[in-house]
Amino acid sequence: ILVVDDAPEIRTVLRGLLEGQSHQVLTAETGADAERFLSAGEVDLILLDLDLPDTTGIDFCRSLRDEGCDVPILMLTRHDTVRERMQGLECGADDYLGKPFDPGELIARVHAQLRRRTMEVERVESLLRQKWQSIHDGLQLAQKIQQPFGNICLSSVQASVRYFPVGRVGGDFYLLQDLDGDRAVILIGDSMGKGVGASLLMASALSLLTDLVRRLDSPAEVMAEANRRLLPDLEDLGLFVSAFCGIWDRRHRSLRYSSAGHEPPIWLRRSYRGRRHGLLGTRGLVLGALSAASYEEKCVHPGPGDRLFLFTDGLTEAVPADRQPQLRRGIYRSLLETMDLSIEEQTSKLLDAIPRLGGEALILRDDLTFFMVEFEP
């Protein structure tokens, strides 16, 4: 307890009363002395005289509150008027006691303030525990969502995934799942940032997109609706999400797709006329950028054995901007040279080749996900 009073006899009396109740007591004669005590250590309660040599109790109390000090303040004064009580309480004091004071009343008021402070500390600690538990639960959910699949085999699609978060969890997400007997969804995305915040945003975005692809038939409509739903929260936080959504129809051998500012997947053709690879890019801003954003939808018809290589920007951003074209060319070459391998072997070969392709400048700055899909006959 910090006693701030210019009268030495008052300081002595208060020290004796409070130490008799097993409280530790500091005493200060001026506002400047009191500030030094407050900055040097933890104070649970201030007994503050209204008349100080270098300031008034009112001004000192107001300055403490302006600086964010939340220590309870019990004001003491000889001028026990209604006006002064109002001034003291309005400037941030928690209680008021006139001089001369009854020792029993003083001790009762001190204990009441300390009890209130203890209850507030316990309340804040309880809220913090709840928040940390919520974050912990979110991290566990994110880790479950982001566990690498290894090999996935659906009715007419196989896939192999590699996932490398910068921290324990990250902001990348991916999904390969049957929608019905003939259709499957291929989804990949990247939440801005890395670590806990990005992982929680990732979990929210993936949950929404997974729900939308089950209810909406068009990838472009999925992106537009996801943008509409996510925009308020993303706008407030200054964040965004990139995503690619493809719906594979086995019966018509069609892949309809739309992108929200995501890296275009690489289409690798088994049988071809002309180019052996192409990029599946569409016009569309990242989710959370603009309320009026529109999303383009395109369609391709992959042949038996064709493959689709999806990835997040952690791959290209692993090298400086001037090295990215070289890295991309190396990735295309590696993928085309390994088309005769299984998708699991092809993914592993690419993973082994990336350090060589990126050169000494390769540094994993962001979460990185590979997602290789093969369209079966």
Image (tube, rainbow, N blue to C red):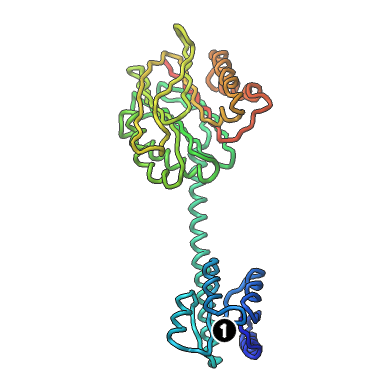
Quarter of the figure with the C terminus: top left
Q: Residue at x 52, y 86 (%)?
A: 108
Residue 337: horizontal and vertical position, in percent?
Answer: 57, 13
Three-letter code, disc 1: Asp
Q: Could you tell whether 199 is left or right of 1 in the image?
A: left
Q: Which element type, helix, strand or loop, lies under badge 1?
A: loop
Q: Is residue 191 positioned above or below 331 on the image?
A: below
Residue 250: horizontal and vertical position, in percent?
Answer: 36, 20
Quarter of the figure with the N terminus: bottom right
**For mark 1, what is the residue?**
51
Whether residue 3 is visible here, answered yes or no, is no
Q: Find the residue positioned furthest to the front.
A: 54
Residue 236: horizontal and vertical position, in percent?
Answer: 42, 47
Whether residue 348 is visible here, answered yes or no, is yes
Q: Along the line of sight, which residue is nearer the eye, 213 or 68?
A: 68
Q: Is residue 271 positioned above or below 201 on the image?
A: above
Q: Along the line of sight, which residue is nearer the eye, 110 or 89?
A: 89
Residue 273: horizontal and vertical position, in percent?
Answer: 44, 6
Q: Could you tell whether 318 is left or right of 226 in the image?
A: right
Rendered image quadrant of residue 260: top left
Rendered image quadrant of residue 304: top left
Rendered image quadrant of residue 358: top right
Q: Residue at x 60, y 20 (%)?
A: 326
